[in-house]
Image: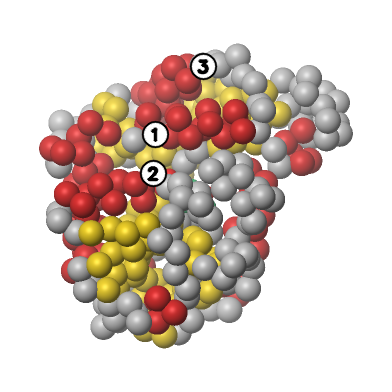
């Protein structure tokens, strides 16, 4: 599924993959307090790599660290340059980049604030996250029995390492039950998101997605809203229940890893006609054009390496 890159950026230096290791008593390993990002680079028309929405990802990474009170000596500019450097050193033009800030070795215990905060940027090749078949015909998802974090238990805006335990439980359950992916509801029973993707529902020309309140504010979600609005669609950010999927014409998931993935069924109830509909196909096509610099109005989101 993934092919690792030979070089990793680790606290300001480029080191070989094998040397990018850490101590078993690293704080994040024990308590899950760490900030991370998932970013993709795509080959642009001139053959050079372009990093999609790097600025937005850096904002979210540093916002996450701020919320988690993680202080690093590395600036936003340092980590931005690190992303560029990792691509250059590994000679990759299409890659998934993984910046991670974690709390290192020193004291253990929850009140500790003196341990060093390390920052790394790794990379690997990652194809269709939910499979090529999923992109073509849609994925089968279930509404998880796991509730998404209460917003007063975990900061929804923060992309935090430990938050993913909830996502992994939901993903394991869905896969064990024969589904490709899970969609989680919030504590009120409203649709929140996939385990690492935001969701959209389409009925006629009306498109809706949950608001930035019970979800991780996805950057792909933001891009899709921008693209669809540009194409003249109304996109409403609102709460809705699982039944919206049952009567939808179309539904799809979006995320840096999943890109745009159509949803074929929810709880074994086939969505719409059982194949990707026009809004899904348009979003998928235009997103792939956007990230490769083929849409003028989206070009400003690309950082060419
Ligand atoms: C990262 C993530 C997403 C997708 O965000 P993008 O910025 O589009 O990659 C959605 N949901 C969760 C829980 C996530 O962690």
- Residue 23 horizontal/vertical position (percent): 76, 29
Residue 69 position by quadrant = top right
Discs 2, 1 touching: Cβ within 8 Å: yes
Near-viewer residue (64 or 236): 236
Q: Earlier in the sequence, mark 1 or mark 3?
A: 1
Q: Which mark is residue 75?
A: 3
**For the point 15% across and 54% down, which residue is it?**
231
- Report the Cα–Cα distance between label 2 and label 3: 21 Å
Near-viewer residue (11 or 245): 245
Q: Earlier in the sequence, mark 2 or mark 1?
A: 1
**Residue 288 in view of the camera:** no
User: Which quarter shows the C terminus?
Assistant: top left
Name the residue that disc number 1 marks: 56
**Element class at badge 2:** helix
**For the point 62% across and 19% down, which residue is it?**
72
**Element class at badge 1:** helix
**For the point 51% across and 52% down, which residue is it?**
213
- Report the Cα–Cα distance between label 1 and label 3: 15 Å
For the residue carrying disc 2, how many other residues have a C-alpha within 10 Å: few (<14), some (14-19), or many (20+)? many
**For the point 76% across and 31% down, which residue is it?**
26
Discs 1, 3 touching: Cβ within 8 Å: no
- Report the Cα–Cα distance between label 2 and label 1: 7 Å
Mark 2 Cβ and ligand 1 under 8 Å apart: yes
- Residue 32 horizontal/vertical position (percent): 71, 42
- Residue 177 horizontal/vertical position (percent): 58, 79
Residue 130 position by quadrant = bottom left
Mark 1 Cβ and ligand 1 under 8 Å apart: yes
Name the residue that disc number 2 marks: 219
């Amino acid at each position: 599924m993934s092919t690792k890159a030979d070089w990793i950026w680790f606290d300001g230096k480029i080191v070989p993959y094998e040397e990018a290791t850490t101590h078993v008593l690293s704080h994040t390993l024990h308590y899950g307090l760490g900030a991370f990002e998932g970013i993709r680079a795509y080959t642009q028309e001139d053959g050079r790599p372009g990093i999609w929405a790097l600025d937005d990802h850096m904002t979210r990474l540093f916002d996450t660290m701020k919320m988690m009170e993680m202080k690093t000596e590395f600036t936003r500019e340092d980590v931005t340059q690190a992303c560029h450097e990792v691509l250059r050193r590994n000679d990759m033009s299409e890659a998934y980049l993984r910046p991670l800030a974690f709390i290192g070795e020193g004291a253990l215990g929850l009140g500790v604030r003196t341990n060093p905060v390390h920052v790394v940027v790794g990379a690997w090749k990652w194809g269709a996250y939910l499979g090529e078949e999923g992109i073509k015909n849609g994925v089968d998802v279930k509404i998880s029995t796991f509730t998404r974090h209460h917003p007063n238990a975990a900061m929804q805006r923060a992309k935090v390492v430990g938050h993913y335990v909830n996502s992994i439980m939901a993903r394991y359950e869905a896969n064990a039950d024969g589904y490709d992916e899970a969609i989680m509801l919030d504590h009120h029973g409203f649709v929140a998101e996939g385990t690492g993707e935001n969701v959209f529902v389409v009925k006629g020309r009306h498109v809706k997605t949950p608001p930035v309140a019970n979800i991780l504010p996805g950057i792909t979600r933001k891009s899709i809203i921008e693209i669809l609005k540009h194409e003249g669609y109304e996109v409403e950010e609102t709460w809705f229940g699982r039944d919206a999927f049952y009567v939808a014409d179309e539904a799809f998931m979006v995320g840096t890893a999943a890109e745009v993935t159509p949803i074929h069924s929810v709880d074994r109830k086939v969505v719409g006609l059982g194949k990707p509909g026009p809004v899904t196909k348009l979003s998928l096509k235009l997103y792939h054009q956007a990230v490769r610099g083929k849409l003028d109005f989206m070009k400003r989101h690309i950082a060419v390496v």
